[in-house]
Amino acid sequence: MTERAQLVETFMEDVRARNTGQDEFLQAVEEVAEDVLTIEKNNPDYARNKVLERLSEPDRIIGFRVVWEDDAGEYHINRGWRVQFSNAIGPYKGGIRFHPSVNASVLKFLGFEQIFKNALTGLPLGGAKGGADFDPKGRSDREIMRFCQAFMGELGRYIGPDRDVPAGDINVGTREIGYLFGAYKKLQGEFHGAVTGKGEAFGGSAMRVEATGYGLIYFVQAMLNETGQEIEGKRIAISGKGNVATHAAEKAAQLGAKVISLSDTSGTLVAEDGLSLEQIDWVRQQKRQGLDISAPPGGAVFEPDTLPWALEADIALPCATQNEMDEKSAKDLIDSGVRLIAEGANMPLTADAVHAVREGGVSYAPGKASNAGGVAISGLEMSQNAHRRSMTADQVDQELKKIMCMIHERTIREGKTGNGIDYRCGANIAGYRKVADALVAYGTM
């Protein structure tokens, strides 16, 4: 075992003992530890302050019961959480997710990742995540409204514009944010930017819905430009059919790429000659209406019970959910000729998949760098709210491009090696250094 491997294993033994059974969280911590522990060991201030050990323990985990009433008058009880991980460089910031799979481990992994993602943007944002094990599928608008109001009735006492600023995530879009913010405003009796992702009519930012998907493509463009390539003509396989996937597909198609797939849990939508903007919008509308994508228009083919990762592509963008791509899928991609993978979802590659793509010489960007566009625009929304002003869509888009290019620059500055660019290592180190410097300045606080 190498010295670095021994350092990581010693560190992880303690983390595992404190977080038994929290596999997603442990996976996220170990990935960062592999890249930053030698940096910490060789910096006396970082080592004395035990920076990574402090960051791997959330400031607090807030858990609560959510009681709500369905349309038939029956009461339901769900569990809600907010994991406030670090406010070293700004107020806690991170989305809210409603899904039956939500639990403490998932939220801790997301909140831990958010620390470094937010640091990479250069904006003064800390890291947090929240959610509930509520399943909105099949629920009426009024049931979803009542759940959101009940959820915010518990969460509202712990958030605020200078304390913790939640946003949307899976199953929490503009509609849900409207309900959540309305409940917060009534609870507090104040109108201020305590939630982002709001509609433009009441303090939201232009481009927030598009931001994560568009930002992903801007980051991919920067990766390609670094090696003298362009995105035009590239074959891109994308997983998922949600907000990130469809907006990444839209922007890629606008720039002349051939988007050959989108997907859901039942299979993959394939278009060998590239999906048109109309077909991409059809997928988006199907998603909004809760419908499947098994009968696509315009000559595209739906292949049930398949994944996009065996298709012949130049670029792969996993945009569905955590750990969706395993080692076999990663090797299928390598065999099909993929040379670039950028994460649109949070940690969509398993640890074994990451190892396979790095060993295979594939340029790989972790989500904390490549999908930071959403939180970047959330940060701009906070600024717009604080200054009582708004920005046009073009202005926001230009800022988004600028931020994604700056993230790319920070990442390659730390990730350049004699063999090229290690994007994962660069992103982890760059985010870590910014937060570490703040923690050192604070002392034992």
Image (cartoon, grey):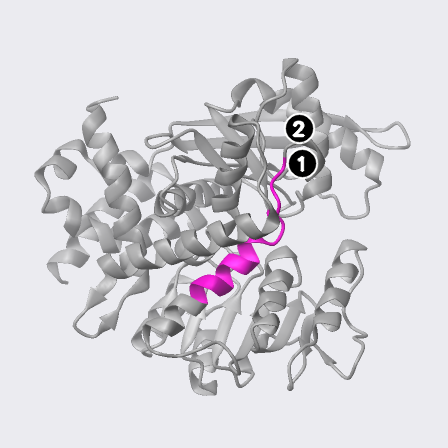
In terms of depth relative to the viewer, which is nearer, 47 or 371? 371
Circle 2 residue: 181
Measuring from the top left, give residue 336's x and y in whole percent.
48, 86
Q: Kindly check if marks 1 and 2 are in contact, taking CB atoms under 8 A apart as contact.
A: yes
Q: Secondary structure at mark 1?
A: helix
* Residue 207 visible within the image: no
What is the spatial separation of the Cα atoms under label 1 and label 2, in whole angstroms?
6 Å
User: Which residue range is magenta in the image?
Assistant: 204-220
Whether residue 364 is visible, yes or no, is yes
* Nearer to us in this view, 3 or 404: 404
Image quadrant where residue 167 sits = top right
Check disc 2 and report its element: helix, strand or loop: helix
276 or 10, which is in the foreground? 276
Kindly identify the residue that appears in the image at 58 percent across and 64 percent down: 248
| Residue bearing mark 1 | 177
Q: Residues within 10 Å of mark 1 (few under 14, many from 20)?
A: many
As for residue 155 lying within the magenta part, the answer is no
Q: Is residue 283 above or below residue 394?
A: below
Residue 211 colored in magenta in the image = yes
Tell me the kind of residue under disc 1: Ile
Please provide percent x and percent y for residue 187. Answer: 67, 16
Corner quadrant of residue 95: top right
